Amino acid sequence: MSHIQRFPSAAKAASTNPLKMSQPLGAALAYLGVDRCLPLFHGSQGCTAFGLVLLVRHFREAIPLQTTAMDQVSTILGGYDNLEQAIRTIVERNRPAMIGVATTGVTETKGEDMGGQYTLFRQRNPDLAGTALVFANTPDFAGGFEDGFAAAVTAMVERLVEPSPVTIRTQVNVLAGSHLSPGDVEELRDIIEGFGLSPIFLPDLSLSMAGRQPADFTATSLGGVTVEQIRAMGASAATIVIGEHMRVAGNALELKTDVPSHFFSRLTGLEASDRLVRLLMEISGRPVPARLRRQRESLVDAMLDGHFFYSRKRIAVALEPDLLYAVSGFLSDMGAEVIAAVSPTQSPVLERLKAATIMVGDHSDVEALARDADLIVSNSHGRQGAARIGVPLHRMGLPMFDRLGAGLRVQVGYRGTRELLCEIGNLFLAGEMDHDHGHGRHGYGDHGEPSRCGGGSCGCNAV
């Protein structure tokens, strides 16, 4: 029976290798999925610098990110003047279509009234009425990455989406959670368009963060969903909501526009992919494209081929809550045992996880729980702990700064599930082959027990 463990502060005074990322960082990523947008952190320069470095290392792209540069005086007396001046400077120099403001711990601790500041800014700056402006409250001392992403998407829905008296039967909205990579979004676009439908993704990272080479320098995001498309979401026939943390945004969109929403907790796995395909058939009235039928057959065949290597494998997973749920569910479907599921923050989705131990913790907790595991699934920050206990690491999530193509990986739909199945399955297969050739570190004994050299001298590259 799964159970959720939480460490009280007295038992664990500090996190030595954090798994958690802040709300402003999640909000920045959501804003980057809007075309010609410039995210603005309302706080000190240090907050912005940290988030900028992390996103640049993961996506290997130029990341537009600005700050109101709060100092000690403005922090105490109030930061509205900094905010107004920053927005006016951005508009004059860069002419963005939208500015997305995310608060930080400095302004949230001060207790700044962001709703009041938005109203005041619009009253004092009527000449900037043509620039879309979105404010999201994202304190970095509460919640985490998914919460900030969800807050920004909800703010965009509430500020920009307009109800429509007409319905475009072929148009669908997709609220794409932070656990979906740009490659995932592109895959979903191909699936939806295969049914003759036109999707509007909010946010659309596949157009802005998948890698592009502009002819000229641009200080704003390049590609993504346009502000005009966001406004037109009220005319869609349906909304597909992906991820538990997007539920609030989905409810806000349905309440504002009466567009019916359909919730998916995950899109990784055969059954989850089947649910999406059935929904698209109902919305479009079209049969399943032959390409998707072939992909489904290929996935079923890969599951038959690969389940031998997953059976009875012990895996520890440490990811953001919705990605944790998707990956843990897939591994359980394949016959593996998830011995530990570690989340950086609390989430309702944790109650539905299939794992021997579920906890809110960090990478040091993973290291303690995964000593008898066959595999750890986490981001690149988990590599040191995995190396110390001699367990292979499969990198997923954000950040992934020590591998190329992190933003292009696909793990949704039939094709994405098949790719993930083969990637992890090949780690298990390589471990068995290494054992046959004398390697001990990642090999498996005659009874399926992991055997490792422990000394780190075998030259293996799995970690």
Image: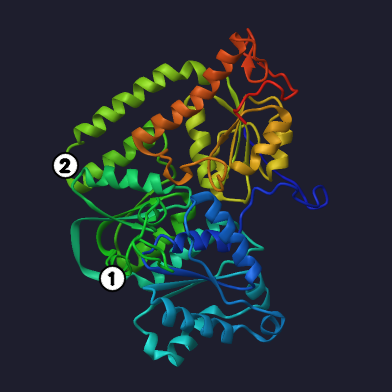
Left/right placement of residue 274 relative to residue 357 reads left
Residue type at tag 1: Pro
Which of the 4 quarters of the picture holds residue 359?
Answer: top right
Image quarter (top left, top right, bottom left or bottom right) of the N terminus: top right
Q: Which residue corresponds to mark 2?
A: 286
Q: Position of residue 371 (x, y in %)?
A: 71, 28
Q: Which residue corresponds to mark 1?
A: 163
Q: Is residue 166 visible?
A: yes
The residue furthest right is: 10
Do the CB atoms of the residues marked 2 and 1 lie less than 8 Å apart?
A: no
Instruction: Identify the residue at horizontal 43%, vertical 79% (top origin).
Output: 93
Regarding mark 2 in the picture, which secondary structure is present there? loop
Instruction: Identify the residue at horizontal 55%, vertical 51% (top origin).
Output: 57
Q: Residues within 10 Å of mark 1 (few under 14, many from 20)?
A: some
Residue type at tag 2: Arg
The figure's colour scheme reads rainbow
Instruction: Identify the residue at horizontal 48%, vertical 39% (top origin).
Output: 326
Left/right placement of residue 20 relative to residue 231 reads right
Q: Is residue 116 visible?
A: no
Numbered circle sitting on residue 327: none
Q: Is 292 placed above or below 90 here?
A: above
Q: Which of 70 and 162 lies nearest the eye of the viewer?
A: 70
Left/right placement of residue 301 relative to residue 444 reads left
Q: Earlier in the sequence, mark 2 or mark 1?
A: 1
Q: CA distance from mark 2 to mark 1?
A: 27 Å
Which of the 4 quarters of the picture holds residue 315?
Answer: top right
Regarding mark 1 in the picture, which secondary structure is present there? strand
Q: Position of residue 21 (x, y in %)?
A: 61, 54
Q: Which of 47 and 273 lies nearest the eye of the viewer?
A: 47
Instruction: Identify the residue at horizontal 40%, vertical 73% (top origin).
Output: 98
Image quarter (top left, top right, bottom left or bottom right) of the C terminus: top right
